[in-house]
Image (tube, rainbow, N blue to C red):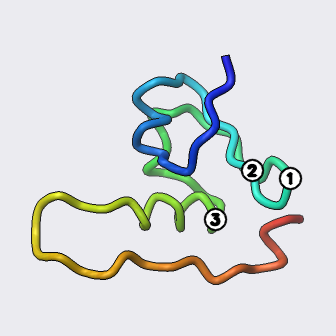
Amino acid sequence: LIFISHDLRLVSSFCDRVLVMYAGRVVEELKASELKQAQHPYTRGLMNCLPQIEGGQRPLPTLERDAAWAK
């Protein structure tokens, strides 16, 4: 089964293994349980964009595109 989503929290609840793609290429592969230890800047950026229920409302961070991510 392939599950495609930007919501990595949801992905980690359904999947054992995660492939993160950027610009049509796999940039990182890791166990879903290891998403918080992601190394690639795009994966970390996606994790940082997840909304938090607790705390005050704040704007979600945005990702600045980086051509190096696709390498």
Which residue, given by chain and number where applicable, does mark 2 sit on?
21
Q: Residue at x 24, y 80 (%)?
A: 58
Name the residue located 43 percent from the left edge and 78 percent from the top edge. Answer: 61
Frontmost of labels 1 and 3 is: 1
Q: In the current view of this chain or complex, which residue is farthest to the top?
A: 1
* Side of 59 relative to 48 (left or right): left
Label 1, on which residue? 24
Question: How far apart in space, not on screen, are marks 2 and 1 (Cα)?
Answer: 6 Å
The numbered mark, 1 or 3, whose residue comes first in the sequence reads: 1
Please tell me whether mark 2 sits on a helix, a strand or a loop. strand
Q: Position of residue 38 (x, y in %)?
A: 55, 53
Q: Residue at x 49, y 35 (%)?
A: 11
Kind of element beneath mark 1: loop
Q: Is residue 55 above or below residue 5?
A: below
Around disc 1, counting alpha carbons within 10 Å, would you say few (fewer than 14), some (14 to 19), or many (20 or more)? few
* Position of residue 57 in the picture relative to residue 12 (left or right): left
